[in-house]
Image (spheres, rainbow, N blue to C red):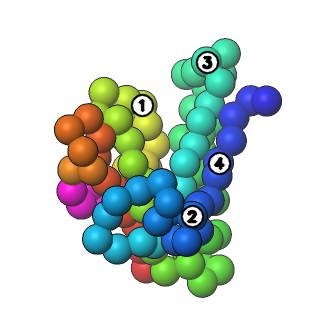
Amino acid sequence: MVGMIDLISPELAREQYRVSEYPFFVEFYLGSFASGSYLMTELLPAVVEQLLEGGIGRIGAVVNRRNIAAEKVLKKARFKKIDAFDLEQGLYEVGL
């Protein structure tokens, strides 16, 4: 597997996250052998745009603050940091 993009429903997010509101959440992963290929930088924005245009109004993401590459990918996909999730992670969101 090269990587994955996973969309988590609000119902499942309630089991995994503790936030005030529960939009859909996205998680993504790229194998280390593909690091630096910009594959996720190109794929995630396109996937997010299709999801938003398809009727999902908001998408959240939780990212470790030390994962600068993941933060850059989220920014490229128009995510904005909205809050701290916990001491080590930031909470991001994008929506129409």
Judged left or right of residue 5, residue 13 is: left
Q: Mark 1 and mark 2 in contact (Cβ < 8 Å)? A: no
Hey, which quadrant is residue 69 in on the image? Answer: top left
The kind of secondary structure element at disc 4 is strand
Residue pictured at 45% horizontal, 72% vertical = 23
- The residue sitting at the bottom extreme is 55
Q: Nearer the viewer, residue 66 or 16?
A: 16
How far separated are the C-alphas under marks 4 and 3?
Answer: 15 Å
Q: Which of marks 2 and 3 precedes in the sequence?
A: 2
Around disc 1, counting alpha carbons within 10 Å, would you say few (fewer than 14), some (14 to 19), or many (20 or more)?
A: some
Examine the rendering and report whether any part of residue 37 can be seen: yes
Q: Position of residue 1 (x, y in %)?
A: 79, 30
Around disc 2, counting alpha carbons within 10 Å, would you say few (fewer than 14), some (14 to 19), or many (20 or more)?
A: few
How far separated are the C-alphas under marks 2 and 1?
Answer: 26 Å
How far separated are the C-alphas under marks 3 and 2?
Answer: 27 Å
How far separated are the C-alphas under marks 4 and 2?
Answer: 16 Å
Residue at the disc numbered 2: 12
Amino acid type of the residue that numbered disc 1 sits on in the rendered structure: Ala
The kind of secondary structure element at disc 3 is helix
Around disc 4, counting alpha carbons within 10 Å, would you say few (fewer than 14), some (14 to 19), or many (20 or more)?
A: some
Q: Position of residue 25 (x, y in %)?
A: 50, 61
Amino acid type of the residue that numbered disc 2 sits on in the rendered structure: Leu
Residue at the disc numbered 1: 69
Q: Quadrant of the C terminus?
A: bottom left
Which secondary structure dominates the residues rendered in magenta?
strand
Amino acid type of the residue that numbered disc 3 sits on in the rendered structure: Ser
Residue at the disc numbered 3: 32
Residue at the disc numbered 4: 5
- The residue sitting at the front extreme is 15
Amino acid type of the residue that numbered disc 4 sits on in the rendered structure: Ile
